[in-house]
Image: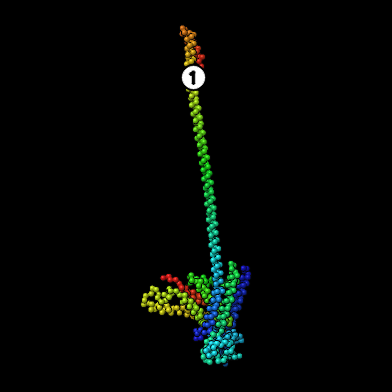
Amino acid sequence: MKRPFLALKTAFLAVFFSFFVALSGWAQAEEVHADTTVAAHGEEAESFNANEVIIHHVLDDHQWHFTDHMVLPLPVIVYSEAEGLRVFMSSNFYDEHHQPVVYQGYKLEHNHITLNDQPVVDLSITKNVAMVFINAALMLLIFLAVARAYRNNTGRAPKGLQSFLEPIIVFVRDEIVKPNLGHHYQKYLPYLLTLFFFILFGNLLGLLPGAGNMTGNIAVTLTLAVFTFLITNFSGNATYWKHIFWTPGVPLPLRIIILPVEIVGIFTKPFSLTIRLFVAITAGHIVLLSLLCLTFIFHSWVVGFGATLVVLFINLIELLVAGIQAYVFTLFTALYIGMATADDHH
Amino acid sequence: MEFLTPGTGLLFWQFVVFVLLFLLLSKFAWKPILGSLQEREASIQQALDSAEKAKQEMASLKSDNEKLLKEAREERDRILRDARTAANQIHDQAQTDARKNADKIIEDARAVINTEKQVALRELKSQVAQFSLEIAEKVIRKNLSNDAAQKELAEAYVKEIKIN
């Protein structure tokens, strides 16, 4: 590889990257601004409510709100005993002035749909569900292409996307999975790789301007943790269960305390996974948005400029967090499965 | 807090999508990717192993060669040494033989000379006896009365005697 090209590429990437990060901050600012105008339109000159703006951003939504003038309606899928399965677009919940309206008895209030004030089963394609789809589609696209590259490139050095992702795959295999799972590792490697890349891609997509806070949603992290929980306990061997119900080398009176602790421990593991990822990603988004909201609270360009700089910096940290959280979730999953399948060493 | 209440729709879709994603990726992505990685690692390991083996073979071949060379050299030295010893032996033998022969010849010659000498002495003795007899005869014939003449005659005859 020629050195000048490398320098050029690096420079290009740096410029592109800073542009992207700045854009991300700007888009979020735009969103905040849009929300303020909505607020201004709705109630008579209500003061800027940063709390509402931030919470609205990090929560799920039935429509995809890019800016005030760019709202992507999403399909609503609801099931109720009275009307069965119903599918319609979420734009039906708003009139032309963006004011909420009741559509054929269905009412959308604080992200909850009710039919004539009765609860319904809501399976809508919300913003985060759409993010899940995009994430999955992106992963399929990328990894099927990489797999194809491996087939076509047999016996040759990896190149392009393949050579970019190979070290990450090898890292997950050799640094996360193998040390924790020992000789069982091949059985669990596909799940752990899927998990790692799902979280990594989700975290990175969540940082894009206008994107949903997918891995910062407790439903997503809970589902992932439940998979880990199920796999851990279904692969648990006799030693694992023995350690929980009859921990070796513990005097009898202590067992009264140890047993409940161990049983609670089975559930605290997935709980900690759920909360850790959710909190880390959501907190990052809240910090970013809070800093941007300062601009609108102070109505000052100077604060806006300063906030943008700080947001740029926080965004870089968020990129780091995206990788770390994917690593940590996968590491702990591997650790839990490893503990449940480890051979008896006592 | 709406934060901590997971939405049913998102739970459902996340579950469905993740299961599908896992199945699809496992079959169509992870399997070929991990397989190729393992294959490549195995082939690299194999290449390294065979290189190491070739190196060892080379080393053993070299040592074999050196051993052969050393053996050949030793063989040569041994043959030379043997040849030299044989030559020396032959030389010594020849010398001894020659000396023995010479001794024998000398011995024989000495024996012959002795025999000849004995023969000659014996002949001489008999001739001396003959001469003595002849002298005595002549002396007796010439002057048996005259002592002086007898003596003169005897002396004259003795002068005549020459021992060859």
Relative height, residue A91 to residue B22 (above, below): below
Q: Residue at x 52, y 36 (%)?
A: B94
Residue count near mark 1 (Cα–Cα under 10 Å), binned few <14, some 14–19, many ≥20: few
State the residue in front, A153 or A208.
A153
Specify the farthest residue to the top: B145
State the residue in front, A130 or A54.
A130
- Residue B35: give x, y in percent of width and height: 55, 70
Amino acid type of the residue tagged 1 in the rendering: Glu
With A87 as the anchor, is A232 left or right in this view? left
- Residue A115: give x, y in percent of width and height: 53, 90
Q: Quadrant of the N terminus of chain A?
A: bottom right
Q: Residue at x 51, y 32 (%)?
A: B101
- Viewer can see residue A290: no
Total labels: the figure holds 1
- Residue A290: give x, y in percent of width and height: 54, 83
Relative height, residue A208 to residue B43 (above, below): below
Q: Tell me the residue that label 1 is attached to.
A: B123
SS for dot 1 = helix
- Residue B58: give x, y in percent of width and height: 55, 57
- Viewer can see residue A238: yes
The subunit letter for the residue under badge 1 reads B
Q: Residue at x 60, y 80 (%)?
A: A23
State the residue in front, A73 or A167.
A73
Picture quadrant of residue A63: bottom right
Q: Residue at x 53, y 90 (%)?
A: A82
Q: Quadrant of the C terminus of chain A?
A: bottom left
